[in-house]
Amino acid sequence: HPTPATTTMAPLRLLVTCPPGTGKTTLCQTVFKSLTVRAGQCEVDGFLTTERRDASGRREGFDCVTLDGTRSAPLASIEGPRTGHVVGKYNVQLAEFEQFTLPILDRALRAERSGAPLIFIFDEIGRMELLSSDYASRVRSLLESSNPRLHVLGTVAISGGGFIAQSKRLPGVEVVEISVQNRNAKADEVLQRLLDACGCAAPVDAPAGQSPKRGLVGHDQAPEQPAGSNGRRRWQRKVQQTEPEGY
């Protein structure tokens, strides 16, 4: 009989959506933190979007950041530089965004079909990001990939046309809508589904058949550990995360 790690379960393609500020970025960070304790059982790669605030707490822009928080690049700023790409009051730094995200997406698209499963987490499919046609095409390829060992957890704006709407209707994609009331439970549910899809064993600190208590824990509680190979992370460094509140 095949072991869980060698079953042919369809790869997961999950897109989390909710009104701005509800917690989809935080859910992704929570799931990542829980996955990093399964060193050697699965690899985790991707990036998130975080707010940038000035000394007074006023939001002045958005950054893209690796899951472990060690690298970042600007996505958009109120004050500029003026790039000719504007969403609301934000100047989108398209070149910097593409230089940061496209190589990470390409790395996932080149993932081996054998060996440890890869869970790819990205944030997000939104109006700013979709100014890049190269980004949109790579995300589409990611969601449509036939690689059975590539599992995807992404976020998507709750409303919008174009690829925002199209991504939710792609074959195999499941949209997970969260609220303030259910986001902790949904984080647990998403995590468990990813673990099941990867064939990962239950954590050693939990009773048999039961997952440990999880949820939206403080972002400073994860231990620093060394990085895995090929730029992917099997352990997490400390990182603070702030949920973007919309544009």
Image (cartoon, grey):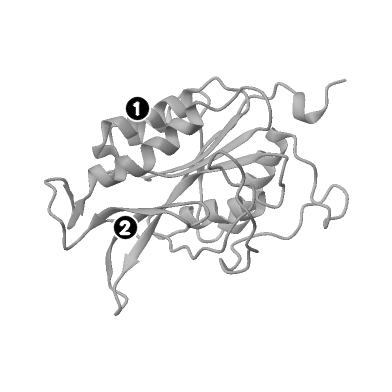
Q: Are marks 2 and 1 in contact (CB under 8 Å)?
A: no
Query: Residue 214, how many percent across, how many down?
Result: 68, 59
Q: Is residue 226 left or right of residue 133?
A: right
Q: Which residue is mark 1?
A: 137
At numbered mark 1, what does the secondary structure look like: helix, strand or loop? helix
What is the three-letter code of the residue carrying label 1? Ser
Q: Is residue 195 left or right of residue 66?
A: right
Q: Residue at x 63, y 27 (%)?
A: 149
Is residue 104 shown above or below 48? above
Q: What's the CA distance linking mark 2 and mark 1? A: 22 Å
At numbered mark 2, what does the secondary structure look like: helix, strand or loop? strand
Circle nearer the N terminus (2, 1): 2
Q: Residue at x 64, y 24 (%)?
A: 10
Q: Residue at x 75, y 39 (%)?
A: 200
Q: Which residue is mark 2?
A: 62
Query: Residue 8, how many percent across, how many down?
Result: 70, 21
Q: Residue at x 60, y 58 (%)?
A: 184
